[in-house]
Structures are given as C-alpha cells and as structure tokens.
Image (cartoon, rainbow, N blue to C red):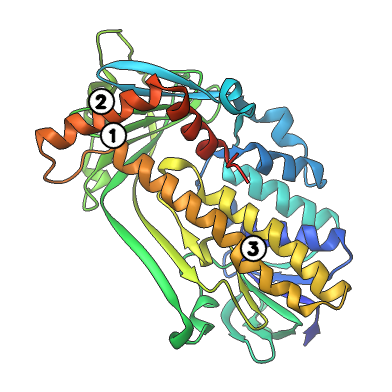
Amino acid sequence: MTRTQVGIVGAGPAGLMLSHLLSLNGIDSVVIDNRTRVEIGKTVRAGILEADSARLLADTGVSDRVLREGHPHEGIDLRFGGESHRVDFRALVGESVWLYPQTDVFVDLANARERDGGDVRFGVSDTSVDVSGPAIRFTDSDGIAQEVRCDLLVGADGSRSICRAEVPEALRRHSSREYPFAWFGIITEAPRSAPELVYAHSPRGFALISQRTETHQRMYFQCSPETDAAAWSDDRIWEELQARVAGPDGFALKEGPITEKTVLRFRSFVAEPMRHGNLLLAGDAAHTVPPTGAKGLNLALADVSVLSEVIERALLKNDPDALDAYGPRALDRVWKAQHFSYWMTTMLHSLPAATDFDVRRQLSELASVVGSEAGSRYLAEGYTGCWPA
C-alpha cells in the first residue's frame, strides 16, 4: 500500500502534466496506466499546440524541445473553389500555433517525470478505483497487487474512463453528438506540400494537408465511418487527395510512399460535472472534440493547468472549497472549444443529403470568413485558443 496526496489514473499528457505541475508545488502524486510507456509513445495523435500549451511545456521546465524542434505556424489556408485563402493568426490575434506531435509531448513529459523522480507506473492491469477512500487498486507490471490511497483522485484515463463511471448516474449530465463521417488518415514519406496546414472544402469532401517533419507528412480526407483502410491502394489514395485539393491555381500534393493508413471516427462529448467529491476528471475522460479544430490535447493541458491551481489551494492552503471552481472554469473553455470544433467541422465537410442550397451556403460562409477581418479574427481566436476573457 502506498500513500500519496493525489492519485492519477492515466499517464497520457494530461496525467503526466498534472503530476509535473503538482510536483513544482511540493504535492506528491502517483500516476498509473494500463498501457506501457512504449505503447503510449507509439500512439499517433494530434500535432498542433496552441501557444499557451507550448509555453506551458517550456516555462514549467518540462522541456524546451517544443521551441527548438517544433514549427511555429502563423496561419492556415482555407481552400475552397479550387483556391487557397490564408488566415494570418499573427496579424489578427498576435499568436501562432506550434506543429509538435503529441507523441513528442508525451516523451517530453515522461522524461521529465523520470528525471524529477516522479512515481509513474506503466503497464499495470486489473485497475479499479474507490472514490470513497479514495484509492486506486491494480496489479503492477511485476504481477504484484497494489493499492494507492490518496486525498484526491484524478481521472485522466481517456474516453473510456473508468473514473467517469464513478460519478453517480443520477448526477451525470452527458452531452454528445455523433458525426456521420470519419477521416481517412495517412502518413507519407514525402516533402511538405505546403508550409502550413491546408483545410480544403471540395465537392468530393473535406481534406486536411498537415505536416510532421521535413520528410514525413500527415494527410486526411473525409470518408464513411465504415471505410476499410486496407482496401485502398496507395494510387487510389493519392488520386482522391489530389482531386480534393485540385484547382485552377495548380496546387498539387507532393507524393511518396504511404507508411500508415487509419480511419479515424470522431464525436463530440462532454461529461458534467467534472468534479464529484474527491474525484476530478480531466482531458478525454471528461470531453472529446472532433479533430477539425485541433483542440483535444490543448483542452487536456488547459484542464490540468486549472486543476493544479485548485488542488494547490485545497491541499496546501487548507481550502477544500477551492475545488468547486475547477468544473465551471474548465467547462467554460470546453464548451467554447466544442462550438468552435463543431463550426469548423460543419463548415468544411460534405454533409449527408446536402442540397445545392446547403453547399452554396457553406461556400458563402467560407467566403465570409476569409473576406472579413471579423470573420477571420474569430477563426484565429478559436484556433489559437486566444478567446477573449
């Protein structure tokens, strides 16, 4: 049996960042995860960090690698009608975003926790939680039964959270939306096709042209959720992607061998409350967003930034009422991100049973966004996370 102040279920970026922030204030924590460190490090996820997320990694001493090896993007291209229209974040809101894969965020955080002597236990099994204790019970990677007793229990254990289920059903308010499409994602060994992300609306459906490194790129196109990635040849994939970005300006993608194919389903989900007694939820355990607006990882880091503050007040300043502020503060940003992600998704994707009116309205909306400083500013605020207070 181990005694600690904060028990954290989930050793992804949310759980590790919370553990790191707490340690800076002298608060002990134990973090556990069913996955091994290698498994988490190989999970390909988001690649865009808001400026505040990049600063959080650098300024709190996790690593400055995001500033050295990440790529600042000062805008994006919205492409429709076969033409690209740049939205300049730097000019509109004075901020950029950073291209820095979530796998690298995890590596930096895991290394920082190891460097600083953090108690992180990967590869456990048979995990259960007791919110009345509170306590976490599990079998460690050596097959030994363990129990961690704590003052506060944090569920940062992803969209299939076991901690979220501990909120009594009568108190839960779950809001969700399923989307009738998915993304077909690839990683290709090819040079960059564009210096910044390209969000393309086309008669054939949405496409996103993203980057990873100088030699490896990530791209997506809208598909049915039932699409079998293995049934698509490389030639067919490139033909589809090229068709979705084609236009009179001659823009074309730089092709190369495709090393990974996946179909990514997505939905919007929010669990309320984010706190029940000594249980607090963070990241995907409390909310998920469609990837169109690049909000998922950034919301998780924003959650734990707020959570570390209220835990510090609760445990170090003997102010348990401080925990009451967590849910309302976090949910204010969560719902703004939900709206932004929904707006971006419905504006750019081909919608089922869409009429000519629907398509023309979408094109007019896109034209209004890029043709108006106010419209472009709203997109820039949402994408960079610089929402007005």
Judging by the rendered image, the residue that carries numbered circle 2 is 244
Question: Nearer the N terminus, badge 3 or badge 1?
Answer: 3
Disc 3 crowd rating (10 Å Cα; few below 14, some 14-19, many 20+) is many
Q: Badges 1 and 2: C-beta atoms under 8 Å apart?
A: yes
Placement of the N terminus among the 4 image quadrants: bottom right
Judging by the rendered image, the residue that carries numbered circle 1 is 206
Q: Amino acid at mark 2?
A: Arg
Task: Name the residue nearer the viewer: 145 or 239.
Answer: 239
Disc 1 crowd rating (10 Å Cα; few below 14, some 14-19, many 20+) is many
Relative to 283, say whether 354 is above or below. above
Task: Name the residue nearer the viewer: 358 or 375.
Answer: 375
Relative to 358, say whether 115 is above or below. below
Indicate the secondary structure of the residue bearing disc 1. Answer: loop
C-alpha distance separating marks 1 and 2: 7 Å
Indicate the secondary structure of the residue bearing disc 3. Answer: loop
C-alpha distance separating marks 3 and 1: 33 Å
**Mark carried by residue 11:** 3
Q: Badges 3 and 2: C-beta atoms under 8 Å apart?
A: no
Task: Name the residue nearer the viewer: 168 or 331.
Answer: 331
Is residue 80 visible from the viewing direction of this image?
yes
In the image, residue 102 lies at what x, y percent? 58, 45
